[in-house]
Image (cartoon, grey):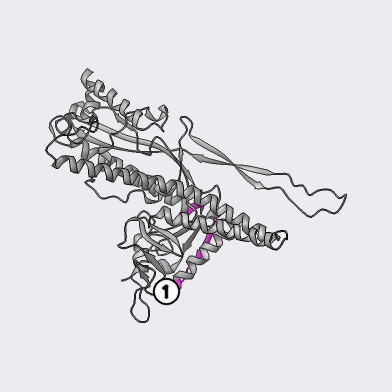
Amino acid sequence: MSFSKNLIEKRDASLAKAEAIVEAAQSEARELTAEQDAEISAALDEVRSLDGQIAKHSELEKRSAEAAELRKENKISAVVSTTVVKSEARTYHPKADSSFMADAFAAQFNNDYSAQERLNRHMTEERIERRDVDSGAFAGLVVPQYLTELAAPLARAGRPTADIANKHQLPNAGLTISLSKITTGSSVAAQTEKASVSETDMDDTKLDISVKTFAGQQSVTRQALERGTNVDTIVMQDLVRAYHTTLNTAVVAELLASAGQTVTYTDASPTVPELYPKLLDAIQKVQTTFYAGPNVIIMHPRRLAFILAALDSSNRPLAVPTPYAMNPVAVGNGSVQYGNSGYSIAGLPVITDATVSTAQGASTNQDTIYVGNAQELHLWEQGNGEPMMLRFEQPLAAKLEVLAVVYGYAAFTANRYPNAFAQINGTGLVTPTF
């Protein structure tokens, strides 16, 4: 079953719960109690939160299915004897005669008209295929997608946490995003006849979120650029992947700084059965203070491996691929994946992220587990989240070198509702042994 279908079932269950309360009251010809009214409000809050998640994951699954179908069509067309043209090839693709990076350099420094024409055509293609992005996202050259999707020469942790955040389009100008946070709300109280109605003046504070610049550079020799093969692919892959990993590390650090609820797990000999209540404590702390349910657990891959490796007194695993064998701590759909692991604990999907710090605590050997609502981890990015700008700064002519610079802007916060996240820390999360 897909993740979105699981969310739909959870949404339908919450809605059915609320409807059952109303139907019971109607059948008994009575008004709803205050507790029942609160239950309905909580259920509807959860339904609204799940609706947002369902829309996001449904779109992801739809796009993944479309991509799989396209790959299937391309594979079929490669083995049939006749050639079927599905669409015109992009200006820059892995087998193109022209190099994006070489054209960018030639257009800027050699006034190469043909190179500039190819770059203009590429930018037009980007605008057409990314219609949801406004023109402000294209202040620089958009890096061709194939340069960011192929296997990178250096393995990097990627952006598992950033990918589940609540995405927003970064404004075209400004270095600060300001939000209003209500600190004092209205009051409501029982009124005696003719007495004044309860009134409390609302108050707010301003939450300022800095727009950060993430950038990297690489020197490339003219010989490699002009006569090498796939040099721009290797350089751009590494720069772009480094960009995403660095951004993701900063987003995880924001969770560490802003998660408003804390659970301490102190244990000289950590075990999974002793960790499990701490996870449930984190869940209830989010529900008790944020008044909505968490929808994700984020942890380092080593922590999920620690959970999966645990055995009960009969040497049976406490985490299993399906929930039918015993009473497991965690369940999953099969082999563990990086990022969206395919496993869940207490019904919450587990995201593994290698940028989660493993240097916390007095002995700098502890990791942190985050339990919370990803809708309150906000991330503003330009365009589709790629570092859109490519610049050739100050060519090192004396050494026949060119300095390529990739950079992008992003802003993020988990401080709109800090209590939407809880963090679990302590000596029970030291480096696990297997």
List the single residue furthest toward the bottom. 314
Q: Is residue 145 left or right of 189 when viewed as pictured?
A: left
Instruction: Give the side of residue 101 with respect to residue 171, left or right.
Output: left
Tell me residue 56's x, y (percent): 43, 46
Who's the residue at 32% across and 25% down the image?
A: 124
Q: Is residue 396 above or below residue 289?
A: above
Work out whether residue 359 or residue 382 is closer to the camera in this orientation and state it.
Answer: 382
Q: Is residue 267 rendered magenta in the image?
A: yes
The residue labelled by disc 1 is 327
Q: Amino acid at mark 1?
A: Asn
Spot occupied by residue 166 in the image (x, y as percentages of width and height): 47, 45
Q: Is residue 65 magenta?
A: no
- Quadrant location of residue 131? top left
Figure disc tally? 1
Residue at disc 1, secondary structure: loop
Q: Position of residue 280 (x, y in %)?
A: 50, 66
Q: Is residue 112 visible?
A: no
* Towards the viewer: 196 or 58: 58
Please give the range of residues in magenta.
256-274
Q: Residue at x 63, y 45 (%)?
A: 182
Q: Quadrant of the N terminus?
A: bottom left
Q: Is residue 17 above or below residue 380?
A: below
